[in-house]
Image: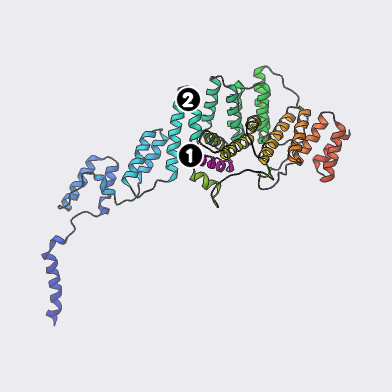
Amino acid sequence: MRTSLIRPALLAGAFVMAFPAFAQEAPSPDEFLALNIYLQRNESAAVEAELRRLRVKYPQWTPPADLRQLSRTTTSPGTEIDSFYKQLAAGQVEQAQATLAAMRRDYPTWTPPADMSVQLETASGQKSLDAALQGGDVEAARSVATRTPGLLRCDRINNAWRIAEGQASAGNKAEALATYRAILGACTDPGDLAATIEKADAVSTEAELRAMVSMVTGRFPAEAARFDQLLQRLLAGRGAARTVVVPQPAAPSQTPARPAEQPRQQAAAQPRQQSRSPESGTSQPAPRRSKESPAQCAARTATARAAATVLERAWCVYNLDRTMDALADFRTALAGRLNAQQQREARYGLSLAYLKLGMAEEASRIAAATDFTHQQRVDVERQILDQRGVQAYRERRFRDAIRYFDAMEQIAGGIRRDIAILRAYAYLNADLRTKARAEFMRLNNELSTNETRRGLAASSD
């Protein structure tokens, strides 16, 4: 019995010893780890030493001619991605393009993240923009900036500055001023805004300079002292005397609600220079796929080239408050092939973007040349009159402000409370005391506030 039990074990051992050819003939993927590391580091001596070790251990194995094939068991790149971003950071766009192409080739099942393509496109566009500006071709630089997402964002404010400087050097001071004003309406860093105003000083009149300072002060009341000091310094450089500011009611403390969420509740004795989008009855088409957020839409259309899709992206980034990007996209769409309705929508969007940046004159020129729908025209004209009226008030042209606000009321069929209060103060400052008191009385009867009570007291003296 014992012999019969032992024999199978003995036979099994003999079976294994008699067939050594069933032993492993090639290294496992794990054994290529060290070799792959040496390859990535370009350590030739270490590569040769590791190959000798593997040949001794697996004499029947022959390494491939292209040793990189040994890493094909990995389905996605590793250090290559780091190399890609390092190359972009160093401005080595062609090398980064080659690295990405190699990753696509070597890892056919791998899909590069969208961020890689976007950053590569932005870096490539930056290089083209730099070349255009260095060659003095401002129009080419503008064209690159408008078709490349990201080049006109505030974190790349230097691009917009350089374009404006190029426009000024070419004698296009109005265009340069428009570029500077676009920056002032879109960016938020006080230091960047102050630097922009200093740059714009060379291409602006005194009234335009004051208007720009008024714009940023309205957007950022807490920085008013800083911007006023800047204005006085720049005026002193021009030899202009400091003027006495007409006393105005204090600015409201609360932040205006975003449009399309609820009506603006600002008790605007001194409203923001930048007019808001219409809060009711507004036609602001922002076409995108159902249940798709503006951010998703912007990501989906990031590399769009067809004019209709660029128009779609323009509305998406407009709704994300990326106004300068929207401005560029609306312009690009208009330069492409759009039908009549799409052209009207693109011009409408361009007008709204200009208005969002506080550029009423540019919006007015578009409105004068476009056959808007009735609702679109009401939306645009109302905001133009709003901004012109506020600007006239700030410049102490009180009767002009009253005319703008009256026209705004007629076009829109009504007037916001903040503008009505401002108009009442315009009456008061224009020595139309009876009208001022009547308006303050009406407003106070509707809703008594500190503003209306102060206005009543001021108009009764």
Label 2 Cα neighbours within 10 Å, binned few <14 / some 14-19 / many ≥20:
some
Please identify the dominant SS of the magenta region.
helix
Please state if 265 lies on the left or on the right of 348 as rendered. right
Magenta-span inclusion, residue 353: no
Q: Is residue 46 above or below residue 459?
A: below
Bounds of the magenta span? 305-321
Quadrant that contains the C terminus:
top right
Q: Where, by quadrant of the figure, is residue 24 drawn?
A: bottom left
Q: Is residue 231 above or below residue 148?
A: above
Image coloring type: rainbow
Residue type pointed to by label 2:
Leu
Q: Which sits earlier in the primary sequence, circle 1 or circle 2?
A: 2
- Residue 248 position in % (x across, y down): 77, 32
The outermost residue toward the top is 239
- Residue 392 position in % (x across, y down): 73, 29
For the point 24% across and 55% down, which residue is it? Answer: 28
For the point 82% across and 45% down, which residue is it? Answer: 446
Magenta-span inclusion, residue 309: yes
Q: Disc 1 or disc 2, which is closer to the eye?
A: 1
Name the residue beneath numbered marker 2. Answer: 133
Q: Secondary structure at mark 2?
A: helix
Name the residue beneath numbered marker 1. Answer: 306
Residue type pointed to by label 1:
Ala
> In terms of depth relative to the viewer, which is nearer, 305 or 266?
305
Quadrant that contains the N terminus:
bottom left
